[in-house]
Image (cartoon, grey):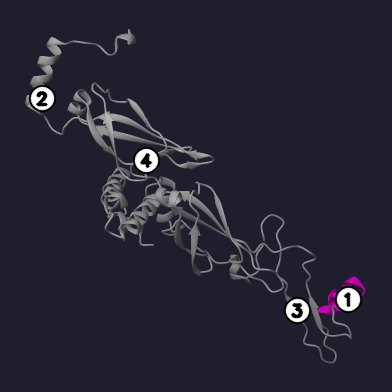
Amino acid sequence: MRDPYEVLGVPRGASAAAIKSAYRKLAKKHHPDSNTNDPKSAARFSEINSANEIIGDEDKRKQFDRGEIDAEGKPRFQGFPGGGARGRAGGPGGGFETHTFRSGGGPGGGGFEDILNSMFGGAARGQRPGGGKGFEFDTGGIGLDLDLSVAMTVSLEESVKGAEKRVRLPTGKELNVKIPAGVAAGQQIRVKGQGETAQGHPPGDLLITVSIAPHPFFKIDGSDLRLELPITLYEAVLGAKIRVPTLGGAVEFPIPKNTSSGRTFRLKGKGLPKAGGTGDLFVTTRIILPDGNDAELEALMQKWRDGHPYNPRSDFG
């Protein structure tokens, strides 16, 4: 993935507000619902969401700027401590790869196993029959942790419909992974046999932890979705039919007369899949006034105020 600052078109020193503004503009411009004839819009929209997931989050942005994570939010490989061999502990309790130490042998030349024999008073464990000069450390039944763990961010649409995503492993290998429809944030997907390998052990698995990128319109509330719908002053007073975005495409929704800002409507079955059905979409109206000063509107409101006074805050005392 490209540098998230480059994707959102903001400098590295940009404020959080500037990043948020850039994200909203790009997300609106490249949303798949608005670009049905552009097959690349979904990929672009996903890239924008992934970039915002990194630099739109204060903690992740600091980690990225310090070089601790890459553009996909994955930890950057720092090398093995002390530049040592590749063997690694396998989680709590650990596990170790098998290493073989061989002595040079020869007349008068004491080997590594000779030292062990003198310490333990017998043949070293794993010594070959017939006095061979080899010694092996046995794992003693301790299993190796060969699983690999990566994080993946998907868009809300991809989590609902499913998708095929390309993932880069810490080893540098890349592979395509199918994300099942209905995947939830925090869910872990196991891909068999795509972890690390070690001689004498079955390959580990790839564990993918899924997160869902923030959506420019919807907020997730369990299996329901919430949407703030901007409406004009005259639509609130006179009523109107308004196109409301949903995950399945925009629908026309009637706003009744005298609708106050903050009034919430429910669109049944327009939320997220759940056991036994689908959640709902809750739409909350927000009255938005035009930008700038409008003398005609102000004169109209003054006249209306003088003829129709009322106090919506009378309960406050």
**Disc nearest the viewer among 4 and 1:** 4
Q: Quadrant of the C terminus?
A: top left
Q: Secondary structure at mark 3?
A: strand
Residue nearest the viewer, comparing 77 with 278? 278
The residue wearing badge 3 is 101
Residue type, mark 3 in image? Phe
Q: Residues within 10 Å of mark 1 (few under 14, many from 20)?
A: some
| Circle on res. 218 | 4
Q: Secondary structure at mark 1?
A: helix
Identify the magenta region: 112-126
Q: Residues within 10 Å of mark 3 (few under 14, many from 20)?
A: few
Q: Residue furthest right?
A: 121
| Circle on res. 117 | 1
The residue wearing badge 2 is 297
Residue type, mark 4 in image? Phe
Q: Mark 2 or mark 4, which is nearer the start of the sequence?
A: 4
The CA distance from mark 4 to mark 2 is: 32 Å
